Image (cartoon, helix red, strand yellow):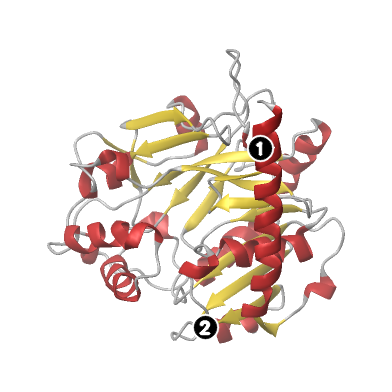
Amino acid sequence: MGAWRSYKLRVQRKRWLIRAFRKRRDLRPVANRTADIRPSDLLVFSTQRNEGVRLPWFLRYYREMGVNHFLFVDNDSTDGSLDYLASQPDCSVWTTTASYKRSRFGVDWMNWLLFKYGHGHWALTVDPDELFLYPFCDTRPLRALTDWLDASSIKSFSAMLLDMYPKGRMDLQPYRAGQDPLEIASWFDAGNYAISKNWNFGNLWIQGGPRARMFFGDTPELAPALNKVPLVKWNRRYAYVSSTHNLLPRGLNLVYDEWGGEKASGILLHTKFLSTFADKAAEELERGQHYGASREYIAYAEGVKENPDLWCKWSEKYINWRQLEILGLMSKGNWA
């Protein structure tokens, strides 16, 4: 990378950090327990709105993984989820009525909390409908992974977003609070993915899966990106650029091996497609707060009118992380 492009990326990174500093004024603390955070704690950062039905399982899942503290931004929820989170002893919560779109879809808020509280910690930035998998997660806690990453001088860890869905219409199996969503959304596309390289940021760009074939069949290039870098040994100099798809400095996006090897990587099981999906899509379309003039939610709203079955004859039922490794969707690399 040339000196001029390197300089422009440094300027851009500083711009995002300054913007995050300004956007801190959007946030009002509801339950700030960050004084309880210890230097070695593993942290989860998340933005949520009206995800009350998902939060009990989300918290249980990551607690069992070994996460010590959760930092949430609540974007004007009306379903009681703000009070629920504020009552949890390992959660710090801020609320805001400010525009999600004008915060760059929550990225400015996350960058501020990461700057303020994430420095020196392994920070996992995920949505309430994302369940993180990593190699050996069935036998080793998250700290085993972060200890290995520290020992290997690796500062960031990638995870492909894998859309999960039920077999049959989404509205036929009601989802209840506290339930494992994978009991319902247990199927995924084993193939059907396109990968290219973003030469500016150095990250891979992945598209495909059920959202591409069902909601963006005529315009696959507009399908949502599936590449993410959710786990980072955070430094206050870092900044996410576009969700967790890429971040700066640029080197944090180089989470793959271009020389024939295979770096360790994970998966984010994306459990969006439950019985709650149609109402959520309609709500977000009405709010108009999402990327690209909410074109993703326009496609969703049109596509779910008949409560479609995302399952197809090439769908595969999820078993465990080893199955995903065999399919080439994640890798244990040289972590044995």
Alpha carbons under labels 2 and 1: distance apart: 32 Å
Q: Is residue 115 above or below residue 197?
A: below
Q: Is residue 27 visible?
A: no
Amino acid type, callout 1: Arg
Crowd band around label 1 with a 10 angstrom C-alpha radius: few (<14), some (14–19), many (20+): some
Q: Nearer the viewer, residue 84 or 246?
A: 246
Which residue does the image show at 57% across and 61% down from the upper left?
107
Q: Is residue 2 above or below residue 105?
A: above
Say which amino acid is labelled 2. Thr
Query: In what quadrant of the picture does the C terminus appear?
Result: top right
* Left or right of residue 311, residue 142 in this image: right
Is residue 181 in sight in this rendering? yes
Residue at (43, 28) in percent of width and height: 196
- The outermost residue toward the left is 306
Pinpoint residue 111: horizontal percent, then vertical percent. Answer: 66, 60
Q: Position of residue 264 (x, y in %)?
A: 62, 30
Query: Which residue position is annotated with label 2?
Result: 97
The reply, left or right, for residue 272 in relation to residue 4 is: left
